[in-house]
Amino acid sequence: MPPTTEDQIQRRAAIRDLLVKGPAETQASLVSELQRLGHVATQSSVSRDLREIGAIKTSKGYELPSSNESADQQVAAVAELLRSITPAGSNLLVIRTGVGAAQRVGLALDRSGWPGMVGTIAGDDTVFVATESAHAQKNLITRIEHAARS
C-alpha cells in the first residue's frame, strides 16, 4: 500500500528533525533511522523527500541549508566539488565538478541569488551558468572563487 500524503508529511518532518541534529552521511543511514522511528521509508522515498525539503549533500553528508547562511557560505559548502571555471563566450560559464556533483553545485548557485546570474543547467559533472553580460560573468567568477577560498 503506497504511503499517504500524511505519511510523507510525517516522514519529511522526521527527516528535518534528524538533519537539524546533524548531517546524515548517507541516504541508507536516514532510511535506517526513519525505520527505527516507525516510519515507512525506502532509499527512493528518502531521496525524493530530501529533494522536496531542500536538503543539500555536502562533504559531511546530507544537510539542511541554514536559513541565515549567506550565499557565499552556500557556495563554500560545495567548493571542494569544483574542478574548474571556464568562460565560454561573453555570458556563459562552464563549471566542471567532481563526478556526480554538478547538480549540488548548480543548486547552491541557484540558491545564492547572486545578481547577474540568469540560471544554471547541471548535468553529471558540468554546470552551465548563463549570465546577463560579460561584466556579470567576470563578477560571478570572482564571487565563486572568493566563496571557494572561504
Image (cartoon, rainbow, N blue to C red):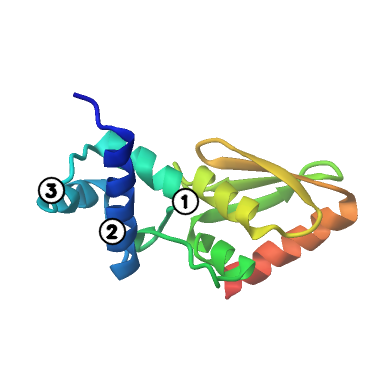
Q: Which numbered disc flags the more N-terminal residue, 1 or 2?
A: 2
Residue indicated by mark 1: 54
Give the residue displayed 28% in from the left and 48% down from the top.
Answer: 10
Image label count: 3
Q: Secondary structure at mark 1?
A: loop
Q: Nearer the viewer, residue 149 or 130?
A: 130
Q: Name the mark on residue 24.
A: 2
Instruction: Using a 10 Å C-alpha cutoff, classify the residue at mark 2 as few (fewer than 14 neighbours), some (14 to 19) or many (20 or more).
Output: many
Q: Secondary structure at mark 2?
A: loop
What type is the residue that disc 3 sits on? Gly
Q: Nearer the viewer, residue 7 or 86?
A: 7
Q: Name the mark on residue 38.
A: 3
Q: How far is disc 3 from disc 1 in space, using C-alphas?
A: 23 Å
What type is the residue that disc 1 sits on? Gly
Q: Closer to us: mark 3 or mark 2? A: 3
Instruction: Using a 10 Å C-alpha cutoff, classify the residue at mark 1 as few (fewer than 14 neighbours), some (14 to 19) or many (20 or more).
Output: some
Q: How far is disc 3 from disc 2 in space, using C-alphas?
A: 18 Å
Where is residue 145 shown, x and y percent of the image? 66, 66
Where is residue 79 shown, x and y percent of the image? 53, 62
Whether tag 3 and tag 1 are in contact, CB under 8 A, the answer is: no
Whether tag 3 and tag 2 are in contact, CB under 8 A, the answer is: no
Whether tag 1 and tag 2 are in contact, CB under 8 A, the answer is: no
Q: Which numbered disc flags the more N-terminal residue, 3 or 1?
A: 3
